[in-house]
Amino acid sequence: MIGGLINRLTGKKSLSKTRKWSKDEADYILLCGTHTGGTEIKAKSFFKGLLAEGKRVFMDELDNYSTYENATHLIVFTATYGAGGPPINATYFEDLIEDIEPKSPLKFSVVAFGSTSFPDFCQFGIDVDSWLNSVSGFERFLPLVKINEQSSSDLRSWLSLWNRSTDMNVQLELKSVSNKLSKVENFTILENPELNVDDTALIKLRPSNAPEFRSGDLLSVISHEGEKPRMYSIARVGDEILLSVKKHDNGICSSYLCTLNKGDTIQATLEHNKTFHFAENAPSVWLIGNGTGIAPYLGMIEENKDASINLIWGGRTESSFDLYKPYIDKAIDKGSMNGFELALSREGKKQYVQDILDEQSDKVATALDSGGVFMLCGSMAMQNSVLEVLDKITNEKLQKSISTFQNNGQLLKDCY
């Protein structure tokens, strides 16, 4: 096909050597668009991770898109080249998906790689996601994610969402942005109250030893022998751990955690998450999250000494927040934070966190311009919506893109 011809003309090595299953045998089709090879390395790592999970997967170039007899999922890893254009092996992809209709519906997920130092950050990946969403035969499985500078942290967030959504435990060989402790530890349940109106629990645990950890680090929980571990963002309150868990009907680990009693022990591993710790020297910190993404913030507000803290949390109803309110009220009484605002999707104005940010655009712009840090924790959909609003605000008010502030370390993310 065209992609193979380009490879022969340019001397670029084909991705075909990574094939194990044929294109018509595979359930998962992984297509890669790469120019310098960095994105291909990440794609191959994901390919190997799927194989290790026992999945039938076929990997190829975007320009070799074809029909697939048994495929159910299409995953795209692609870079952007030049001023928002396609990499060398993806120049015909738009035409191909318009001309070749899938034999059966394909669920698609796009992972875009780029650099915020360029104005057209991940533009080709954005285009691919838009094309697939508009062509018949494709159904979005996961929201588009944009990876800055091959960030292992950004990719780990997407991988966490993939694993949760597919009940897999795909592992990637990534550059270390976190350091796992050397062994599994025992953790004792200190509190595990009844589920709230959203089937969510706020669980307090104590580690058997006294490992070094901070709010924003991750707890990888082993629910049963042989089961896949699940990772949760945690708060540190004193020497104890808080994690917020939403119980899902088919969630093995969430059901396990939510039914534990005081005094029970679990096995888990702590993982340092250095890219999502409280910004100690910032003049102001905006804590933005939804659902269980509030968990690490409950510990971060205790760390605060001088920063002005603003919390914006998104949930369904005001009673959804009752689980966390005692910790927030205590911090306000101590003077550790200014206050909080709730974005409730089922009550009152029926809004989301990005709506509140949009309403406070002048305040947001002033905070960023003066060195304030914005932290995002929660769903990937929330992250994407918030980033769109922040980018609009910074462009209109400060004549700069949000990428400028991300490069300055003023935008920290841990979404899934």
Image (spheres, rainbow, N blue to C red):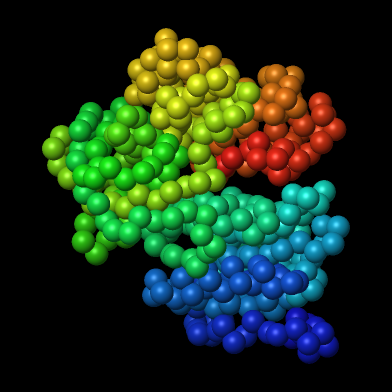
| Rendered position, 408 above or below 50 | above
Q: Residue 392 appears at what percent x and percent y?
A: 76, 33
Residue displayed at 44% across by 55% down: 179
Judge whether residue 52 can be spotted in this image: yes
**Number of numbered labels in the structure image:** 0
Residue displayed at 74% across by 43% down: 403
Question: Camera-side residue: 218 or 144?
Answer: 218
Residue displayed at 82% across by 57% down: 84
Left of 46 or right of it: where is 372?
A: right
Q: Residue 371 appears at what percent x and percent y?
A: 69, 29
Instruction: Indicate the quadrant where residue 11 lies.
Output: bottom right
Instruction: Indicate the quadrant where residue 383 lies.
Output: top right
| Rendered position, 190 above or below 117 | above
Q: Residue 186 appears at what percent x and percent y?
A: 21, 49
Judge whether residue 248 can be spotted in this image: no
Left of 231 or right of it: where is 40?
A: right
| Residue lying furthest top | 333
Left of 301 or right of it: where is 152?
A: right
| Rendered position, 247 above or below 69 | above
Q: Quarter holding the N terminus?
A: bottom right
| Rendered position, 241 above or below 298 | below
Instruction: Indicate the quadrant where residue 192 lies.
Output: top left
Q: Residue 305 appears at what percent x and percent y?
A: 50, 21
Question: Camera-side residue: 255 or 406?
Answer: 406
Residue displayed at 42% across by 36% down: 215
